[in-house]
Amino acid sequence: MRTNNPFIIGLTLVISGIGIFGSWSVALYKIIDYSVTETTAQAKIIGYKISSNGARMVKSNKTISGRSPFFEFKTITNQTIKSYSKSPQIFMLFNYELNEEVTVAYPINNPQKAILISWKEIPGLILMIAFGLIIIIVGKSYLIKK
């Protein structure tokens, strides 16, 4: 297929791919880093996030695809924190169940930035990182003169 301006297409794809790859790589890095360097706690899944009109919590997960779980935990200072997973939950086989016990890690001075430490977070992150790499490769092919 012939395009009028392959340089602009390639540049747009490479920049988009770097953004996707970078942001989801940082999320994967945080799971690894927080589990080693930050405070951990046991949390309970209390619902699922729906995104219509902002992030809201529902108690049922009646969809085919995965939904990001809301979780609740107590910090070491006995503060109750409610948050949800920011990782993409795309596989229904890896869904979290209501009242499931999970491990979270959080910076001691900012428990609102808690993240789930679970293998169920990894597949969506790996898929998004791979998607970013594919976009970079396709974009690069537009930039390289033949």
Image (spheres, rainbow, N blue to C red):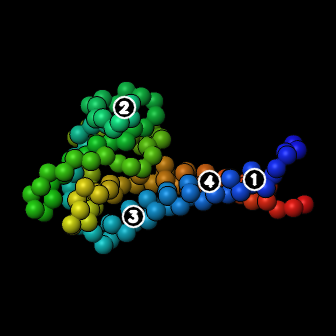
For numbered disc 3, what is the local secondary structure? helix
Q: Which residue is mark 3?
A: 30
Q: Which residue is mark 4?
A: 16
Instruction: Give 2 or 129, whichever is nearer the viewer.
Output: 2
Please report the residue visible at 22 percent of the width from the left and 47 percent of the height from the top.
82
The image position of residue 92, as x and y in percent, is 44, 37
Please report the residue visible at 46 percent of the width from the left and 62 percent of the height from the top.
26
For numbered disc 1, what is the local secondary structure? helix
The image position of residue 113, as x and y in percent, is 29, 57
Instruction: Give 116 or 141, whichever is nearer the viewer.
Output: 141
Total labels: the figure holds 4
Question: In this view, which residue lies farthest toward the right?
Answer: 146
* In this rendering, the label closer to the viewer, 2 or 3: 2
Instruction: Give 137 or 13, whichever is nearer the viewer.
Output: 13
Circle nearer the N terminus (1, 2): 1
Q: Amino acid at mark 1?
A: Ile
